[in-house]
Image (spheres, rainbow, N blue to C red):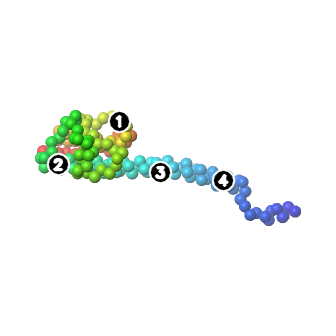
Amino acid sequence: MLNKFRNNDKGFTLVELMMVIVILGVLAGVAIPMVGRLRKDALLAKYESYASTIGSTLIALDMTGDFDWPGEAIVPEGGWKEWLGEYVNIQDDNVDVKVLETLPDTTENGDTIVITLPDDNQFKVAVYLDGKPTTVTKTFTLNK
């Protein structure tokens, strides 16, 4: 009679099923944070590209002599992002562009690209994610 039950192994035991669930849980626990980090790194790389393009564009506009650096209080109609849109293709509704005297410690909520006004023929373009500064700060030198 016992041999009859032992030869009838058609399914998985509860222990085997529990081990599979535990392994899947561990894999998900490792993979989910990694995906979030990769998304943030990709976003930062995109904004870094925008920062480089904005800096190069402002240098080129300054060299033509048709561009006067504004004061911090002067904002073009539609904002800086729209004004730069004529020269830089910023395809992201979630990022704002601001021109400030110096780089702030934090910005308002959201992602922001901050351009500083020139000081000693240099200006900076920095990226802030969720209002916090990142490692992306590019310094550009004007040809004067």
Residue marked by disc 3: 35
Q: CA distance from mark 2 to mark 4?
A: 63 Å
> Could you tell me residue 98's position as x and y percent?
27, 40
The amino acid type found where label 1 is placed reads Glu
- Pair 2/3: label in front: 2
**In terms of depth relative to the viewer, which is nearer, 87 or 113?**
87
Label for residue 19? 4
Does the rendering let one see residue 60? yes
Label for residue 108? 1
Q: Earlier in the sequence, mark 1 or mark 4?
A: 4
The quadrant the C terminus occupies is top left
- Pair 2/4: label in front: 2
The amino acid type found where label 2 is placed reads Leu
The amino acid type found where label 4 is placed reads Met
Q: Earlier in the sequence, mark 1 or mark 2?
A: 2
Residue marked by disc 2: 61
Q: Earlier in the sequence, mark 2 or mark 3?
A: 3
Q: CA distance from mark 1 to mark 4?
A: 47 Å
Residue at the farthest front position? 77
Q: CA distance from mark 2 to mark 3?
A: 39 Å
> Could you tell me residue 54's position as x and y percent?
25, 48
Secondary structure beneath dot 3 equals helix
Q: Disc 1, disc 2: CB below 8 Å?
A: no
Residue at the farthest right position? 1
The amino acid type found where label 3 is placed reads Val
Q: Earlier in the sequence, mark 4 or mark 3?
A: 4
The quadrant the N terminus occupies is bottom right
